[in-house]
Each structure stands twice: as C-alpha cells, then as structure tokens.
Amino acid sequence: MTMKQCRQLISLLLAFLLLFGGAVLSEEEEEEIEFLPDDEVFLEDTTDYGDVPWNFPVDLQDMDPAMIRLANKYVLLGKDYKPDPIMTMVRRKANKDGSNANGGVNKASTSEMKLQKECGEALVAMFEGALQDGITLYLKSAYRSYQTQNTMYYNRLKNNHGKDDGWVSKPGASDHQTGLGCDIVSKAWRSKAMNAQFAKTKEAEWMKEHAQEYGFILRYPKDKEDLTEINFEPWHYRYVGIPAANYIMNEGICLEEFHEQLQTAIDQFLEDGGNPKLVEPYIQRSAE
Ligand SMILES: [Zn+2]
C-alpha cells in the first residue's frame, strides 16, 4: 500500500466513524426525549427558595432518612416496612489458632439474623474494633418483622396477665423492625435473660464508649425511660450513621429527643421559606 492509499483509507475510516457515531448519538438523544414523562417538565418547581440556613447540628446530607427512622408506640412502622437492602449476618469463623477471623460477627444463636446492609457492615466493623481492644461481642437479636413482633407481644401479654410491662414493644413500634436495632451481648450473657446488670460488664462499657464511632447509639438509655417509655437496655444499639450518632451520644440524648429537635429545625426552615422538598423525607408520620 502506498502512502497515499494509506491516507485515503484512514480518512475513509474516519468519515465512516463520524457518520456511524453521529447516527448513534442522535438515536440516544431521541430516546432520551421519548423517555421523559410529559408532566415532569411542567411540574418542575421553579420557586427561588433563596439561601435559607439549616439550623441543626447535623447537615441534611449527612443524615439518611431511612437510617434515622424512628419507631416507637407513637410513630409506628407499617406491616410491610422492611429494611432495604437487607443482609444476612455471617457467623465469624475462628482461625486455626483459635483467634477470630475477619468478615462476620459472633452470634449468640445458630438462627439466621438479618440487618439493613449499611448497619450490618457497620456492625462487623464494630465487632472487629472491639476485638482489637480484647472485647468479644455477640449479636443476640437483629431484624424482626412486624409479624414476629406481633407474636412476641401477644405472648408476653398472655404470660403477664394481659398487662404490658414495657419489655416487649407493640407490633410496628419495635426498633428491631427497622433492621437497624441490634441486641449485643458478651459471651456470658448469650443465653441469659437480659437485665440492667449487663451494663456493668466490660463489653457494655466498651460499647457505650465506642459505638458512636461506628454509627451506633444506645437506643434506650437509663435516664430517658420517661421519654422512650422503654426500660433501660444497655445491650440494644441502634445504627443511625456516624454524624447523627456522634451528636446523639455526645449530647446524651435519645432518638426521641433527636427527632423532636429535628422537627423543630424543619419547622424553622420552612417558616424561613426553605424548600419543602429538601426536608420532606425527614418528616416522619405514624403508620396508623
Ligand atoms: Zn433490642
């Protein structure tokens, strides 16, 4: 092939590529326009909300509404509320020398335990962090469906002469239905009935000090029983994400107080003319 023929061939190829590429591009453009729903164009909010300040210690973008979801007897979760995505917790395997291998959690029972994925991964990291400090934690209870909670609640009532003693939440009111609530214990407490004495263990002390570093909070603190209406549970930790966990634990507040403060900040933001779309996902309504 001569130099001239070669150049001709290259320019022919380039022209072909341009034509071909152009055709593909215009096809994509056409498709995109076809896929755009008509009403979306007209529903777009063109209001200028200005620069309304968000007066709350945690930025909106640092909080995932699903992770700070409140569940209690006043703010109920629906029958169909499930963690999304969900993961099955893998049992941590022991190394040949008897030490713990990476990649799972120690479980208090052989039954399958599930958690919301982000929470489950944070839990693995927390168990790993504890091990490095010589603390072995066990997961005793994780996600519970509405139906399971329903059975537990009515069994408890039956065994307690029909009286609600505050130990088992009503269906829809359990933090475990969020898939973000975990009952975490020490080796000795794996098969024991839980009570406040657990707070005296080194495992409970470690969690109280370090859980927030992994995005977990103590869900039912001792001095907040009048607000949570749940007895002190030094074993129940709740994932909310690191920024919210740091704020909640440093302030020594419970999730109910956090939500009250958040709602006040939302009301203020809207009163100042802030964009309702930004805060709408953070407003929680009871399923009933
Ligand atoms: Zn619990």
Image (tube, rainbow, N blue to C red):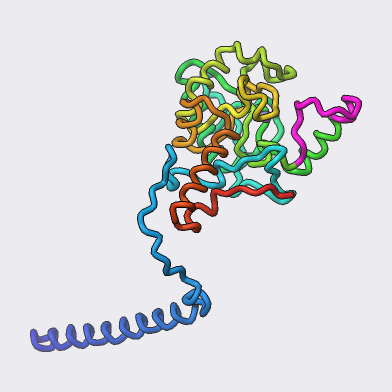
Measuring from the top left, give residue 150's x and y in whole percent. 80, 39
| Residue nearer the viewer, 233 or 74 | 74
Characterize the magenta stretch by its predominant secondary structure.
loop
Task: Please indicate, yes or no, whether residue 102 appears anywhere in the rendered image.
Answer: no
Looking at the image, the residue that sits furthest to the left is 3
16 to the left or right of 180: left
Q: Which residues are magenta?
A: 157-171
Looking at the image, the residue that sits furthest to the front is 271
Q: Which residue is at 49% across, 20% downward?
A: 209
User: Where on the picture, by quarter, is residue 219?
Assistant: top right
| Residue nearer the viewer, 37 or 118 | 37
Please tell me whether residue 15 is drawn above or below residue 53 in the rendered image. Answer: below
Measuring from the top left, give residue 182's x and y in whole percent. 62, 31
Q: Which residue is at 54% across, 52% downward?
A: 281
Q: Which residue is at 60% across, 11% downward?
A: 200
Please tell me whether residue 217 is drawn above or below residue 6 in the rendered image. Answer: above
| Residue nearer the viewer, 234 or 259 | 259
| Residue nearer the viewer, 262 or 167 | 262
Please tell me whether residue 49 is drawn above or below residue 90 in the rendered image. Answer: below
248 to the left or right of 287: left
User: Where on the picture, by quarter, is residue 75?
Assistant: top right
Measuring from the top left, give residue 59's x and y in whole percent. 42, 43
Please tell me whether residue 251 is drawn above or below residue 32 in the rendered image. Answer: above
Quadrant occupied by the N terminus: bottom left
245 to the left or right of 3: right
